[in-house]
Every structure is written in structure tokens, then in C-alpha cells.
Amino acid sequence: MAKSTIKIENVVASTFVNQKIDLVSFASRVEDAEYNKERFPGVVYRTKDPKVAALIFGSGKIVCTGAKSIEDVKAGIGKVFDRMQSLGIKVPQNPEIKIQNIVASANLGSDQMDLDAIAAALGLENVEYEPEMFPGLVYRLDSPKVVTLLFGSGKVVIAGGKSKEDVALALDKVTKELDNAGLL
């Protein structure tokens, strides 16, 4: 069976500057920054290259979202830190960046997957399939701890990974289980 190509759709990561941030001041001095306290409790600061959104909170926590790779996360946070530094905000030299979630997609190569049969084969414990509510089958893996969404079109979405290896391992595991059950 051909190896499916994994496409990273979104990487969410967090980091921290060790001080409080005046969000009103920050947003008023930074182009591409939005702050509306009634809608969201942090500043949304978008960078263009890489295209990411940094959610900056008054506590000093920063969440980076929208990145297509871990490298983009690092580059995006680097740009945010450079901008903060230019405003006199102290930023860590080597910030700890924690990957919170990787969402990826792949194609299992079968455009006629029988989700009812797959639900029966995978067992009830880690599977949710209610086609009236959602067109995909939700399959929760314990190791790696991710959620996979399988669709009749053969597409699969993997969410919750903390590394590219988690995503690849999950795809490999699901592919082998379906192949062994004769469902691919």
C-alpha cells in the first residue's frame, strides 16, 4: 500500500514572557494588532511571513496559531518577540516553546470507505460514529494520544499531536488497523 502524504494544517504552540503586558498600549503601538476586550481577552497580532496569529495575554502568555510547521511557529514567535523588544518589553533569550496541538490531514487512498464497517471493526470503546450528527468517524488513540477523524472519502484528520512523529505514528497505526481488517 502506498504511503499517504501528511499535510500539516495548523500548529498551536505557547510561550511566555516573564512580565505583565499592557495590552492597550501594545495594540495601539503595533500595526496588525487588534484588541477588543469585549470580544477576546488578548491582543491578536498577525504576522505575514510566516502567516501566523499570536494571541498575546496580559499575563505574558503568548499562543501562536495558524502555523503550517514547527519552524513557522518558531519564526512567528521570533517576530513577535522582536516587535515586543522594540517596544521595550523584555523577552527571554531562548524562550521555551511548547507545542500544544498539531492538526494534520492525509488521504488513505480509498474513496469508498465503509464507516459503519470500520466502526464495528475498531470496537466501541474509542470510536464515535453518528452520521446524523457528523459525517466522520471519531477514533481516539491512546498512544499517541490523538483524535483521528475518518471520512468516507478516504480523508483523515489527525488532531492533538504534540510532534510530527505523533501524527505519523497515528496515521501508520490507523492505516495498519484498517488494512488488517480488510477495510482499505
Image (cartoon, grey):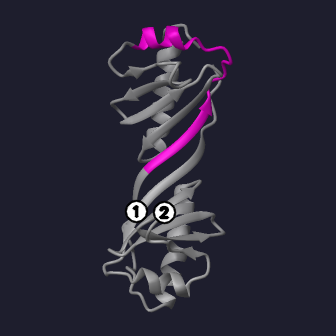
Task: Find disc 1 in the rendering and name its residue.
Answer: 14
Residue 162 picture location, percent across and down: 41, 47
Residue 51 picture location, percent across and down: 63, 63
Q: Is residue 109 left or right of residue 132?
A: right
Task: Find disc 2 in the rendering and name its residue.
Answer: 64
Residue 121 colored in magenta in the image:
yes
**Element class at badge 2:** strand
Q: Residue at x 47, y 55 (%)?
A: 12
In which image quadrant can residue 139 be found? top left
Q: Which residues are magenta?
A: 101-122
Q: Is disc 1 surrounded by few (<14), some (14 to 19) or many (20+) residues within 10 Å?
A: many
Q: Quadrant of the N terminus?
A: top right
The numbered mark, 1 or 2, whose residue comes first in the sequence reads: 1
In which image quadrant can residue 17 be found? bottom left
Alpha carbons under labels 1 and 2: distance apart? 6 Å
Residue 96 colored in magenta in the image:
no
* For the residues bearing labels 1 and 2, Cβ distance under 8 angstroms: yes
Q: Who is closer to the viewer here, 39 or 80?
A: 39
Q: Is disc 2 surrounded by few (<14), some (14 to 19) or many (20+) residues within 10 Å?
A: many
Q: Residue at x 55, y 50 (%)?
A: 10
Q: Is residue 51 left or right of residue 56?
A: right
Q: Is residue 20 left or right of residue 115?
A: left
Residue 121 picture location, percent across and down: 44, 9
